Image: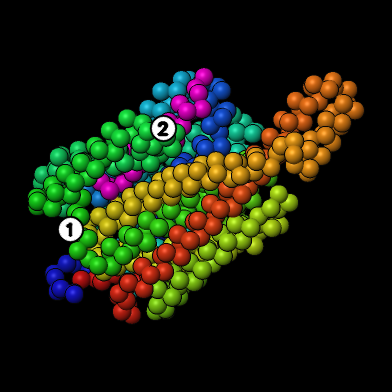
Amino acid sequence: MSQTTNIPAIEYPTGAKKWILILTAISCAILELLDTTIVNVSLREISGNIGATTTEIAWVVTAYAISNVIIIPLTSMLSDFFGRRVYFTSSVVIFTFASLMCGFSTNLWTLVFWRFVQGLGGGGLLSTAQTIIIGAFPPNKISTANAIFGMGLILGPTFGPTLGGFITDNLSWNWVFFVNIPIGVTATFLSWKFITDRPGAVKPSRIDWWGILFLVSAIGSIQYVLEEGSAHDWFDSNEIILLSIIGVFSLVAFIYRELSIDYPAVNIRLYKNYNLVMGSIMNFMLGMMLFGSVFIFPLFVQISLGWTATQTGVFMIPGAIFTAFSMPLVGKLLGNGMNPKRIIIIGIFLTCTFLMLLAFSSPDSSEKNFFIPFILRGVGMAFMMSPILSLAIAGLQGKDMAQAVGLANMIRSLGGSVGIALINVFITKRNGEIRNSMIGYVNQYDEISTSRIQGLVQNFIGKGYSQEQAEALAYKMMEGAVFKQQALVGYNQGFFMVACLILCCIPIVFLIRYKKGKITVASDH
């Protein structure tokens, strides 16, 4: 319901100032999201250069993810406390300086420390950038603002592996971090010059330190469990059990604390808004789909089909471009009053079709088999993303909108972590079952496998190997063939599982309450 208040009319930026402001904000958001994935393809080279094990080097990714998801829900409070201009510019400076120090790091734990600091700066950029972009448009153009932010949301994680692979192959892993420096310096200047404080912002008189402590403990523990659980065999590890208990206890304490005081660090009372709850659930599912599909596809084509990291990254660009071109179309449809539920359902079916097509891949599959599915994914993600972003903040303004944006981004990040964890567990379990099923056919009594092994043995003998060496190499090749087949079937089933999860969103979409003009347009009052 609208309420009449004496809030002065808000002046929206116009002309060149408006677009410089938007470009600065979206560039910073893309930069932050880029760094969630750009390092992934460089981990092997980094571990070799700084002398870290495969398990240890994962902390380079985990540290960034944990600090990122901790700071995101606090950005609204910190922005009001320091002033949006100071906070955003400081976040750019922290992110840029931490990137420089990451590039200069010579041992694992120095790199992990600066990645954590980089995540604190980056998390401050993401949600604040979204509120800046939304604040540059009047309420009846909020769908356009969300379309612009949505482009950054999809382009960052997609271009990350491509850029990371190219830099690693042609320069060195250090430049994965150094590439942020010129962009960060430029963004610092533009942020200080063009970004203003949020209209009507009031500096908090008191800081909810206990709330912040409980939030850091809860989100940090939960994110760690999701990131590292698979590597530690989940609840077979005392460390994972302990952090799960700490995470649940801290989460309960955080919710109780925030509901019992009048100066909460994060205003979770906003969840009294029914559509904000629905938007958050959809945001969680969106995170699972966005990050889950980006996570599983590179593994699939590199392990099962033998693609290189650069080849994989370059292939994913056309789909991202189709998303970028589809975003303005979706923004226009929303602006013209089309029911966002209808748009979301179209997006769900397009994305589900993409995954179903991938679920029937074969060892002979090539880039041409995946081109159309990735176009469908690109358009489908655009049709889902902008309406969901609009839904999550519908009817909110000022501080409430900033809080809702932070919560939405945190929930989407957690959704991505849950999606990756679920896919990891599913594929690991299915790989074991598929291998046991396949390996039973490779024995001396199976005519096909015996014939294949004998053919390989004769081939190696013909190349000058002894009988013993030829047999060892033949069995090794058969082992490799079984592994590739097992991985292919496992990833196919993983794609099918994610497709089924997406279809589960349809009942949630029907639960959304929609009145024309109430979802896509935020109220002035």
Task: Report the residue marked by disc 1.
Answer: 269
**30 part of magenta stretch:** no
Q: Are marks 1 and 2 in contact (CB under 8 Å)?
A: no
Q: Secondary structure at mark 2?
A: loop
Disc 1 marks a residue whose amino acid type is Arg
Specify the segment rendered in magenta. Answer: 51-75
Q: CA separation, marks 1 and 2?
A: 36 Å
Q: Position of residue 7 (x, y in %)?
A: 17, 67
Disc 2 marks a residue whose amino acid type is His
Q: Position of residue 257 (x, y in %)?
A: 13, 47
For mark 2, does the 10 Å Cα neighbourhood hold few (<14), some (14 to 19), or many (20 or more) residues? some
Q: Position of residue 25 (x, y in %)?
A: 40, 52
Q: Secondary structure at mark 1?
A: helix
- Can the viewer see residue 385 in this picture? yes
Say which residue appears at 52% left-offset and 63% top-offset.
Answer: 351
Task: Say whether residue 466 is left or right of residue 18.
Answer: right
Say which residue appears at 78% left-offset and 38% top-offset.
Answer: 450
Say which residue appears at 84% left-offset and 28% top-offset.
Answer: 460
Q: Viewer-proximal residue, 404 or 449?
A: 449
Question: Mark 1 or mark 2: which comes first in sequence?
Answer: 2
Which mark is drawn over residue 232?
2
Q: Position of residue 266 (x, y in %)?
A: 20, 50
Above-or-below relation of 455 to 412: above
For mark 1, does the 10 Å Cα neighbourhood hold few (<14), some (14 to 19), or many (20 or more) residues? few
- Can the viewer see residue 152 in this picture? no
Q: Viewer-proximal residue, 61 or 432?
A: 432
Image quarter of the N terminus: bottom left
